[in-house]
Image: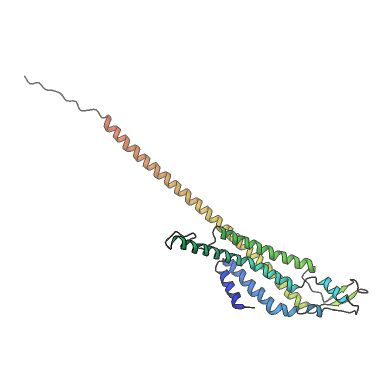
Amino acid sequence: MNWAFLQGLLSGVNKYSTAFGRVWLSIVFLFRVMVFVVAAEKVWGDEQKDFACNTAQPGCHNVCYDHFFPVSHIRLWALQLIFVTCPSFLVVLHVAYREERERKHRIKFGEGCQRLYANTGKKRGGLWWTYVLSLVFKMGVDATFVYLLYHIYEGYDFPTLVKCSESPCPNVVDCFISRPTEKRIFTIFMVVTSVVCILLSLCEILYLVGKRCFECIHRMRGSRQINKARSIANMRSSNTHLDSNSKKLACTSQPAPAYSTVISS
C-alpha cells in the first residue's frame, strides 16, 4: 500500500472536515485500515485450509466451510472500508470542481472580477448538501455491514467446535475453526469501531444541522432588527416632515398687523 498517497488523501479530506469528521477519519485510518492491513489479514490467512473436519469424505470439508463461512470476514471488511471512505473523497472532488469553476471565471472576466465563491472550501449551498449526504451514506454503509456480519454468521462469536451435517457428509461431523479466540477479538473490535464511526457521523450531522438552524434564526433576527430600525427611521423622518409642514401652515395663517391712519388738523 502506498502510504504517501493515503496520507495525501487523508490531509485533503481533513482540510474540509469538522472536528467530528477529523476524529472519524483518524479512527477509520488508524484503528480500522491499519488493523485490517497489519493484523487481521495475517490472523485469517488461508482460513479454508486451517478449517479441519474429522472425516475423509470427499467434498464434506468444502461444503461445511461454505456453510459456516459463506463470505470471508476479510473480504467483507475490505468492501466496507472501500464503500465507507469513498463519500469523503466526493467532498474533495466537489471542492476541486468549485476551484476549477472559479479559475475559469477569473480567466474569462479578469482577476478583478467578482468571485463566484467567497471560500471554495466553505460548506455552503451544494457543498453543504454533498457533505451531509456523504455522512448519511457512511452511516448507512457501516450499519448495513454490521447487520450483514451478524446475519450471515449468526452473531459475532467464533465457537471452537461446529457440527456439520451437510451433504455429502455421511453423518454429523465435527469441524474445528483455527484461532477462534483471536478471530472473535478482532471481529468485536471491528464492530465496535464501526458503531463508534456511526455515532460520530450522527453527531456531525446534528452539529451541521443545528449550526445551520442557528444561522438561519440569527439571520432572521438580524433582518427583523434591520426592518424595525428602518421603520423607526421612516417614522422619524415622516414626523419631522409633518412638523415642518405644520410650522409652515402656522406662519401662513397668522393675521396681518393692523395699521391706523392718523389725520392731523
The answer to which of 9 and 132 lies nearer the viewer is: 9
Residue 187 seen in render = no
Q: Which residue sits at x=60%, y=69%?
A: 23
Instruction: Indicate whether 217 appears above or below 199.
Output: above
Q: Is residue 264 left or right of residue 81?
A: left
Quadrant hosting residue 6: bottom right
Instruction: Indicate whether 262 appears above or below 87.
Output: above
Q: Which residue sits at x=37%, y=42%?
A: 237
Instruction: Indicate whether 148 appears above or below 252.
Output: below
Count of numbered tags: 0
Q: Which residue sits at x=70%, y=79%?
A: 39
- Looking at this view, name the residue that lies furthest to the right: 170
The answer to which of 66 and 38 lies nearer the viewer is: 66
Q: Quadrant of the N terminus?
A: bottom right
Q: Is residue 173 left or right of residue 125?
A: right
Q: Quadrant of the C terminus?
A: top left
Quadrant hosting residue 96: bottom right
Q: Which residue sits at x=68%, y=79%?
A: 38
Q: Position of residue 257 (x, y in %)?
A: 20, 28
Colour setup of the view: rainbow
The answer to which of 225 and 17 lies nearer the viewer is: 17
Q: Position of residue 88 (x, y in %)?
A: 61, 66
Residue 201 seen in render = yes
Q: Position of residue 87 (x, y in %)?
A: 63, 65
